[in-house]
Image (cartoon, helix red, strand yellow):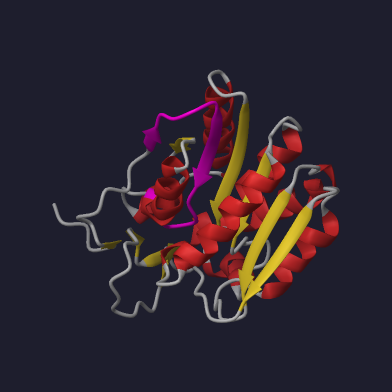
Amino acid sequence: MENKYMVKPHLDGSSFFYSGNKTGFVLVHGFTATTTEVKPLAERLYQQGYTISAPLLPGHDTHPDDLNRVHWQEWYKTVSQAYLELRKTCDQVWLGGESMGALLCLLVASEFPEVAGLLLFSPALKVRKLNAAYLAQFFMKYLDKSHKSDDRQWKGYNVYPLKGAVQLLKLQKQVRRNLHKVTQPTLVVVSEADQTVPVSSGSMIIKSISSQTKKLVVLSHASHTMLLDKDNQKIIDQAIEFVKMNR
């Protein structure tokens, strides 16, 4: 049966794994999205020889009702298990994520200091108007997104499940409490044109983490899903360079 809530249902948004060398990356997608969001980064890193694990988070790539039933701890468990699994075969493991995926990477890194480093894109430590979900969840299940027609390879829901959004708010609080525990080399990329996450989200992360090596990149024109933008390869180039300098 057709899912009227799914954008680009023909795309493959499932978990994927690319087997490479002894340096691994766990790549994590954002709220309402799927693994298509991190695929361009995954493919470039794989071309460099790295091993890639991209888990699909619970409640995603099915139906928005499922996202309204999950708790943030389930997202965290999925990412931490992907990390621990990859650590069995890799000598070092990096974490990379976009939006909510970046928050989950920060939380896993705060729990596991042996994580090699972090690549964070549009990290959703702050999200414009998200606090409204606390009240709105009692009156409606979803909030419609205003989607423009584009050719980006993004697959996900065309609504924000509001109980799921409340779980994102709870995840934000958990991450803020643990930012000081993050000590790994960290690259944070934000954009002034992002209509979802303000630039101050990146500044707060850089200011709060305890990493000796940390870099904030502020772009001018990239959208929230910057890893899928037309200039995404330039962003990915910077990420690969950061990895090479800090391995």
> Which residue occupies 46% across, 52% down?
41
Q: Is residue 182 left or right of residue 152?
A: right
The C terminus lies in quadrant: top right
Q: Is residue 189 left or right of residue 113?
A: left
Residue 49 part of the magenta-drawn span: no
In the rendering, at what x and y percent does residue 101 appear?
Answer: 55, 51
- Count of marks placed on residues: 0
Q: Reply above or below: 192 against 109.
A: below
Q: Reply above or below: 199 against 125.
A: below
Range of residues picked out in magenta = 16-35
The picture quadrant where one finds residue 161 is bottom left
Q: Is residue 135 left or right of residue 155?
A: right
In the rendering, at what x and y percent does residue 243 appear?
Answer: 63, 46
Taking depth in this image into account, of 109 and 222 the one nearest to the observer is 222
Q: Is residue 116 left or right of residue 229?
A: right
Taking depth in this image into account, of 244 and 36 the one nearest to the observer is 244
Q: Reply above or below: 7 against 145.
A: above
Residue 34 part of the magenta-drawn span: yes
In the rendering, at what x and y percent does residue 67 appear?
Answer: 43, 50
Mark yes or no: residue 23 visible: yes
Mark yes or no: residue 59 visible: no
> Which residue occupies 65% across, 75% down?
198
Q: Which residue is the extreme one toward the left?
A: 1
Taking depth in this image into account, of 177 and 86 the one nearest to the observer is 86
Taking depth in this image into account, of 212 and 26 the one nearest to the observer is 212
In the rendering, at what x and y percent does residue 246 appear?
Answer: 71, 44
> Which residue occupies 67% across, 60% down?
188
Q: Which residue is the extreme one toward the top?
A: 88
